[in-house]
Image (cartoon, helix red, strand yellow):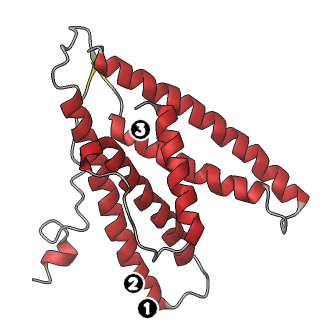
Amino acid sequence: MNATEFNTLFDKIIATYHVIDTVDQPFTNPYDKTDLINHLLYRKSWIDTVQWHYEDIIRLPDINPVEALTLKRKIDASNQDRTDMVEYIDSYYLDKYKDVIILEEAKINTESPAWAIDRLSILALKIYHMREEATRDSASNEHRANCQTKLEILLEQRSDLSSAIDDLLNDLSQGKKYMKVYKQMKMYNDDELNPMLYKKK
């Protein structure tokens, strides 16, 4: 897959979510694990899309504090799921390129393929929602114009990032760059590493 295919898939997933447009809707992955990369990307983008809306809801000024705490726990769990999916996607690429002969002058990239693709997934969400604002009938002309300007910048950013991802995947396939993946090792949700949790034991 290339970045154009990633973008097409992410746009499709976001549109599918907005048919029902609720964070509580059931999730169905149309790709099974025989099509592993699409299976992982679909799940990853769905997590991002639901979390985007969690983040909107928790910012309601009149949200019930108990509901807000429940939602915060969901956001924490979603963040962990997102990180896990990124690591699964990187594992896919590590396996894909495991037999490539690394050139002597090869260099490591500033980020792994999956973390770059993660940024592409978030950009798809920003583009979708900025386009909504740029065309919202109830908004002022000034608001729509400002959002259109931002939308054009986001689209340019997606184009640049897409090119960079394609270049990275091509370089990895030719041994011009190599992958080295570091696990995130998040501490705050680990009851062995977060002192607020292990002191409660």
User: SS class of the residue under badge 2?
Assistant: helix
Residue 28 on image: x %, y %: 38, 64
Tag count: 3
Left or right position of 34 against 99: right
Extreme residue in the top direction:
104
Left or right position of 193 against 143: left
Can you identify the residue that label 3 sits on? 116
How far apart are the alpha carbons under marks 1 and 3? Answer: 36 Å
Can you identify the residue that label 1 sits on? 66
Query: Contact, CB < 8 Å: mark 1 with mark 3?
Result: no
Residue 65 on image: x %, y %: 47, 90
Query: Contact, CB < 8 Å: mark 2 with mark 1?
Result: yes
Disc 2 marks a residue whose amino acid type is Thr
Can you identify the residue that label 2 sits on? 70
Quadrant holding the C terminus: bottom left
**Within-10-Å neighbours for mark 1: few <14, some 14–19, many 20+:** few
Residue 45 on image: x %, y %: 43, 54
Residue at 46%, 44% (x, y): give it: 119
Comparing 93 with 184, the one in front is 93
Residue 156 vertical position relative to residue 166 in the rendered view, above or below: below
